[in-house]
Image (cartoon, rainbow, N blue to C red):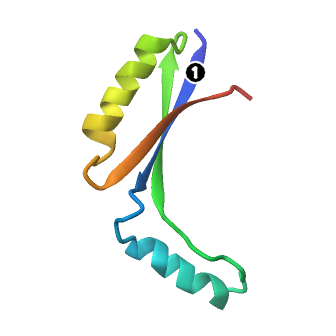
Amino acid sequence: MPVARVVVDVMLKPEILDPQGQAVQRALPRLGFDGIADVRQGKRFELELEGPVDDAALARIREAAETFLANTVIEDFTVRVEESQ
């Protein structure tokens, strides 16, 4: 049975302070990685579905993201289908 992958990327909203991202940004120049103006840290969920990724499946994943995977008070999320390799 074919398996399709859907990716949910969750990021803090721009107005929310991101101390982990700031810590990474401060560390990068010390490690020789110059020229990086900003870092925001997020999280990624990869969901493998059995069968086709249709509108109903994507709607259920968006519901899961909105109610479980992301805290929509402070985070935004995107849902996308990842092409098979």
Crowding around mark 1 (Cα neighbors within 10 Å: few <14, some 14 to 19, many 20+) is some
The residue at the point 39 percent across, 76 percent down is 19
The quarter of the rendered structure image containing the N terminus is top right
Q: Where is residue 79 in the image (x, y as percent from the top left)?
A: 49, 34
| Amino acid on which the number 1 mark rests in the picture | Ala
Residue ID for mark 1: 4
Q: How many labels does the image show?
A: 1
Q: Where is residue 73 in the image (x, y as percent from the top left)?
A: 25, 51
Q: Residue furthest bottom?
A: 30
Q: Is residue 52 above or below residue 31?
A: above
Q: Quadrant of the C terminus?
A: top right
Q: What element carries label 1?
A: strand
> In the rendering, at what x and y percent does residue 4 appear?
57, 21
**Farthest front residue in view:** 15
Vertical arrangement, residue 82 with respect to residue 72, above or below: above
Residue depicted at 41% across the width and 12% down the height: 56
Q: For this rendering, which residue is in front, 15 or 70?
A: 15
* Up/down of 27 relative to 20, above or below: below
Q: Where is residue 83 in the image (x, y as percent from the top left)?
A: 68, 27
Instruction: Tell me: 76 left or right of 39.
Output: left
* Residue drawn at x 38%, y 57% as measured from the top left: 13
